[in-house]
Amino acid sequence: MDAPSANRSSADLSRSTRRQWLAFAALLLVLSFGALHAAGVYGRATALSVLEQQGRTEANLKVALLRAVLERPRALPFLLSRDRDVSDALTDTAAGKREFLDRKLEELVTGTSAAVIYVIDPRGVAVSASNWREPTSFVGNDYSFRAYFSRAMKDGTAEHFALGSVSKRPGLYISHRIGPATAPLGVVVVKMEFDQLERDWHETQRPSYVVDANHVVLISSIPSWRFMTTEPLPADGLAAIRESLQFGEAPLAPLPFERQADDNLIRALLPGGGTQSYLRITVPVISTPWQFEYLVPTGEAVAAAMREARLFALLLLGAITLLAAFWLQRRQRALANAAREQAAREELERRVVERTRDLSLARDRLETEIADHRETETKLQFVQQDLVQANRLAILGQVAAGVAHEINQPLATIRAYADNAKVFLGRSKPEPVLENLDHIAGLTDRIATITEDLKALARKGRTAEEPVAVREVIDGAILLLRSRFTGRLERLVIAPLPAGLQVFGNRLRLEQVLINLFQNALEAVEPRADGRVDVTVEVHEGAVLIAVTDNGPGLSDTILAQLFEPFNTSKEKGLGLGLVIAKDIVSDYGGQLEVKTDAGGASFRIHLRKVGK
């Protein structure tokens, strides 16, 4: 090649090289912008996904806490609607009845999470309230316009969230009708406030609130958002809410939210000023028409994720750029030297093979991990099935043990009567045999009654009441205890009883109550040489008090707090069902079972209605 041709070739090569580098720079610039944009989109989406998972977990925990708070007072109106003191206060206008009920409701509020408890007559006027001492007492106020009153009178029960017309404090009103629908005596109402729950939510520094079916905020960690709306209300719905005074004079204005392209993303104006972006998570509140909404701030997390993704993209793009520049330089040098080009090609092929091998190894490791995860999931399913079966067997064992515990005394007595019958048969005395068989038949009725009482732990049942002689009930209980406490019944001292004294109830069921109390008292004094159980009967106006008092060690505060709860007992072989059944039996016949205890022993006191004057 001559010199001019060589120069032209050199110039052409130089121009080609410059064009290649200019094209490479332009492509790198386009790729950089595209990679940064794609990395930002990916980082934002990843951050929002993580925030949603974390926020939904936190929201579910808060909803679980809210449901626990809601469930505690729900049974209280139902129980009070069947309370004799409440019925008496509505049917008897004497000041003493209502003052007694005021004090009783005041004590109930102190021991529960309710804000106030009050009783309304059929006209809608409050006749008794737990806040009767306060200047803002509800007594005498007309609540006939309240939805919780009208719906309870109509349907039997109601729940209504509203702003108090007297206290001006918001809360959930849980009401229950007193008496049958055909002749209602009134309504008992329990108001529940959520101040502590709102303070707990506020401490998380993340807005949390509950909205009703009309999108009105009821409970909120930000007080200024209460009674605002998440959706604009229609004119007719807004007028109806204001006319009902459910939220007082609240303007029911929309929350200061600015929705973004994604409905779950909003910008909110905070009470202290300034706006912030949030991810809105909604969770329904089971057993209510409410919905819980939880706002998770997205600004810092999304910005950090986008920075990390873009930094990673820049690092990756830088590595690719270096590789591309190196390859381009190698390619340009290859134009002048075929040998070096071949060497570069071989080097590139070698790197490709190594990378392929690494990818294959990575694929094999991934497949192994997937197989391990599937095996773990299979094992977890088997473990869950075993736990469910174990739980079922445990429940079955508790029920079977409860039945065995309660029918032990009647079965022992049946065995004693059967043995006596065999002796009398051997002596050819049929009359005592028939008498013992009659006793055995009566005890089988007792066992049937006991099993019905055990089922009543889950489903309330009641045997029809009738006049019962107190002496027969006590004698029957002692008769059944003889086989168990042979030689120790002398510790059971029965005080003289009034002649012909009768109470309302069922003999077999009341005997079951006394058997349980006598047995517990005798077991409590068994370690003491001077152990003694005194049984006294007192007659008051319209009522009979049967007291079973022992001089044993008494009951601790821990045992006393859970004394009448199922499956709670202080005995090694006890089941914790006897006192639960006994209390239910006494309550079925309009009575009460209470306990007093100190270091000198325990006294169980049964209050029953007296037959006659």
Image: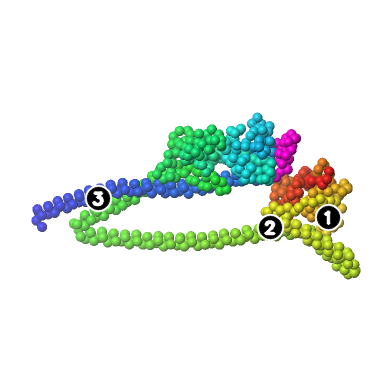
Camera-near label (1 vs 2) is 1
x 34%, y 50%: residue: 316
Q: How many marks?
A: 3
Q: Which of the marked residues, 1 or 2, is nearer the chain's N terminus?
A: 2
Report the quarter where the N terminus lies.
bottom left
Q: Residue furthest front?
A: 182
Label 2 element class: helix
- Predominant SS along the magenta part: helix
**Label 3 belongs to which residue?**
24
Colour logic = rainbow
At label 1, the amino acid type is Gly
x 76%, y 59%: residue: 447
At label 3, the amino acid type is Phe
Image disc number at residue 398: 2
Query: How packed is label 1: few (under 14 Cα within 10 Å), some, or many (20 or more)?
Result: some
Camera-near label (3 vs 1) is 1
Q: Which of the marked residues, 3 or 1, is nearer the chain's N terminus?
A: 3
Q: Is residue 370 left or right of residue 176?
A: left
* Highlighted magenta segment, given as a residue range: 82-104
**Label 1 belongs to which residue?**
476
Inter-mark Cα distance, 2 to 3: 80 Å
Q: Which of the marked residues, 2 or 3, is nearer the chain's N terminus?
A: 3
Question: Is residue 84 a member of the stretch shown in magenta?
Answer: yes
Label 1 element class: helix
At label 2, the amino acid type is Gln
Inter-mark Cα distance, 3 to 1: 106 Å
